[in-house]
Amino acid sequence: ALAKTSGSLWLMTVLDGHVIFSSKNGAGNLYASAGFYTLCKHFVDEFGPFWRMNYNEFIHFIEQYSLSLGFELVTRCLGEHGSVPKTDHLVLHTVVDRRTLGQYSPLVLVHLQERFKLQVPSIYVFRSSSDFLAVFSKLKWDLSVRAPEADRSLRA
């Protein structure tokens, strides 16, 4: 059986052009700094010589809409969280409006994923609640279903 890789909570926002970040353990610690490094490395790896332009656009987008982002920081060297991942990375899980503390739609996650190549968990959009319930009823008691089969059923 494969062990799941998991990580630590990492949060970020932007105020007055400054990136503010912290981990579940607080600000100014190794986890918080590792998250910021991993975010910057993501932009360098994904956008090459255009990384700074894309990073600045990302920062501007977060500040313009008063967003706070919640990530899972997955690293090869920090913590004991299951199997060791192949690469250090961030997984964007939530987007919150700082003004209202309301959570944005998962479609904002999809936008950030597509525009800035951020990793997000699988998101499934159903046409109706009955479509969701049909798939859920089909899979809920089938203990033999593995992730690829479940994914195919959810995408059908």
Image (cartoon, helix red, strand yellow):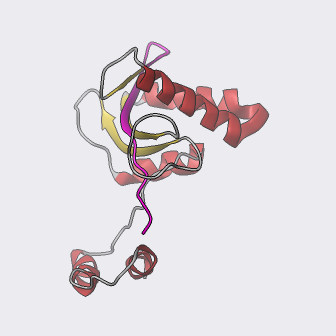
Label tally:
0
Q: Which residue is drawn at 26% across and 26% down?
A: 99
Observer-nearest of 83 and 114: 83
**Magenta segment, which residues?**
1-20
Residue at point 42%, 47% (across, down): 108
Please identify the quadrant where the C terminus is shown.
bottom left
Q: Quadrant of residue 96?
A: top left
Is residue 24 positioned above or below 81 on the image?
Answer: above
Frontmost residue, 39 versus 51? 39
Q: Quadrant of the N terminus?
A: bottom left
101 over 127 or under it: above or below: above
Residue 94 coordinates in the image, percent (x, y): 34, 43
Q: Is residue 38 left or right of residue 29?
A: right
Q: In this view, does 139 lie above or below 18?
A: below
In the displayed image of the protein, which residue is found farthest to the right?
49
Task: Name the foreground residue: 14 vs 148.
Answer: 148
On the image, which quarter does residue 154 sit in? bottom left
Horizontally, residue 17 falls left or right of residue 12, namely: right
